[in-house]
């Protein structure tokens, strides 16, 4: 049965909040029996743990952790004596079944990962998905996440962004995955490890060109370094100073320039029209060629039609 913690949770209220029914009952009043808590922990600096994370970890019946030895150190630091059980990629299916059965029996469980927010490039997705299907109450306890921490300090567009996690480890697969992102106009966030940071940046330069990027290294720790530059500048810096290769990294890449993409697409449409109307099939009607090019590109029909007319006029036999 749950070790209940005292209700000690200040809430930011607005004038409407006390009139509404709570969506997750008891979310502000200690741990609930049978609830699964998804608890974010520090990404380096232990002072970044929240009061709520600490009191939840101390109050639940069981903590599921990625690496029990690693998490034992964190819990020891905060004098938390809750029992720990492992949940990692290799045993998640079997462990999830077992944990859901404990939750159904009324035990409260917290999920943590080695650092940051569970499920973000970390185990837990299967457990949360199955727990939700089983009708378990799931309570997130927000806190550090390397991707959001880096983005908040990067100085790149934050209105729209995509999180790509770790790029593939092999260069061939990595280049293919980068190619698929070439026309992505939103800011792109990657995680990267010490031994792959240089090959990964080099592949980015080959595919994305010399775009603006930010490397956030060892955030919240002693050697925190957040650097913004072109991709080639960042690569040069790491090559000059081997120490810059050490630690954990978030790489944030500026999205593709929309105007540049439109110019490239317009050139592609023109090239295709020329092929259809002049080189390959002079018998193809203007409207057939336009319809094909509209289907093959992201161009609007009226733009393609204007282009087709110009090509058609310029290549009429009598006009040459
Ligand atoms: N769940 C974590 C989170 O919320 O950010 C991420 C876990 S993932 C297995 C670990 C990766 O996150 C590292 O390889 C690195 O790319 C990034 N990361 C974690 N801590 C970091 C830090 N202090 N500074 C920079 N990157 C970090």
Image: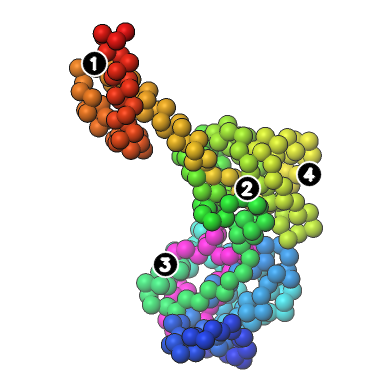
Residue 173 visible in image: no
Neighbours of disc 2 within 10 Å: few (<14), some (14-19), many (20+): many
User: Label 2, on which residue?
Assistant: 251
The residues tagged by marks 4 and 1 sit, at their Cα atoms, a distance apart of 61 Å
Ligand 1 within 8 Å of disc 4? The answer is no
Residue 181 image offset from top left, x and y in percent: 48, 41
User: Label 1, on which residue?
Assistant: 282
Q: Which residues are magenta?
A: 97-126
State which tag comes first along the sequence, 4 or 1. Answer: 4
| Disc 3 and disc 4 in contact, CB within 8 angstroms | no
On screen, residue 213 above or below 21: above
| Disc 2 and disc 1 in contact, CB within 8 angstroms | no
The residues tagged by marks 3 and 4 sit, at their Cα atoms, a distance apart of 40 Å
Residue 315 image offset from top left, x and y in percent: 30, 14
Ligand 1 within 8 Å of disc 2? The answer is no
On screen, residue 83 above or below 235: below
Residue 106 highlighted magenta (yes or no): yes
State which tag comes first along the sequence, 4 or 2. Answer: 4
Neighbours of disc 4 within 10 Å: few (<14), some (14-19), many (20+): few
State the colouring used for the structure image: rainbow
State which tag comes first along the sequence, 1 or 3. Answer: 3
The residues tagged by marks 2 and 1 sit, at their Cα atoms, a distance apart of 49 Å
User: Label 3, on which residue?
Assistant: 129
| Disc 3 and disc 2 in contact, CB within 8 angstroms | no
Closer to us: mark 1 or mark 3? Answer: 1
The residues tagged by marks 3 and 2 sit, at their Cα atoms, a distance apart of 29 Å
Residue 133 highlighted magenta (yes or no): no
């Amino acid at each position: 049965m749950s070790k209940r913690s005292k209700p000690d949770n200040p809430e930011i209220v607005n004038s409407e909040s006390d009139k509404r029914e709570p969506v997750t009952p008891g979310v502000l009043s200690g741990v609930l029996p049978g609830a699964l808590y998804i608890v974010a922990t520090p990404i380096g600096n232990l002072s970044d743990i929240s009061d709520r994370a600490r009191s939840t970890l101390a109050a639940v019946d069981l903590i599921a952790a990625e690496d029990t030895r690693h998490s034992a150190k964190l819990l020891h630091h905060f004098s938390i004596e809750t029992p720990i059980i492992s949940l990692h990629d290799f045993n998640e299916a079997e462990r999830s079944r077992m944990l859901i059965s404990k939750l159904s029996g009324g035990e409260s469980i917290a999920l943590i990962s080695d650092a940051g927010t569970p499920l973000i490039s970390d185990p837990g997705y299967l457990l949360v998905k199955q727990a939700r299907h089983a009708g378990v109450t799931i309570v997130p306890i927000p806190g550090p996440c390397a991707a959001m921490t880096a983005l908040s300090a990067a100085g790149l567009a934050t209105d729209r962004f995509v999180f790509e996690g770790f790029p593939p480890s092999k260069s061939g697969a990595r280049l293919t995955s980068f190619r698929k992102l070439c026309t992505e106009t939103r800011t792109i966030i990657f995680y990267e490890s010490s031994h792959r940071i240089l090959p990964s940046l080099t592949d980015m330069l080959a595919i994305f060109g010399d775009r603006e990027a930010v490397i956030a290294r060892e955030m919240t720790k002693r050697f925190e370094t957040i650097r913004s530059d072109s991709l080639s500048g960042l690569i040069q810096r790491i090559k000059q100073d081997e120490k810059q290769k050490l630690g954990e990294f978030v790489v944030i890449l500026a999205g593709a320039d929309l105007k540049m993409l439109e110019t490239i697409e317009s050139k592609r449409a023109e090239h295709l029209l020329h092929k259809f109307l002049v080189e390959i099939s002079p018998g193809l009607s203007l409207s057939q060629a336009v319809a094909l090019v509209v289907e093959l590109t992201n161009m609007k029909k009226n733009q393609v039609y204007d282009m087709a007319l110009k090509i058609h006029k310029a290549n009429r036999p009598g006009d040459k």
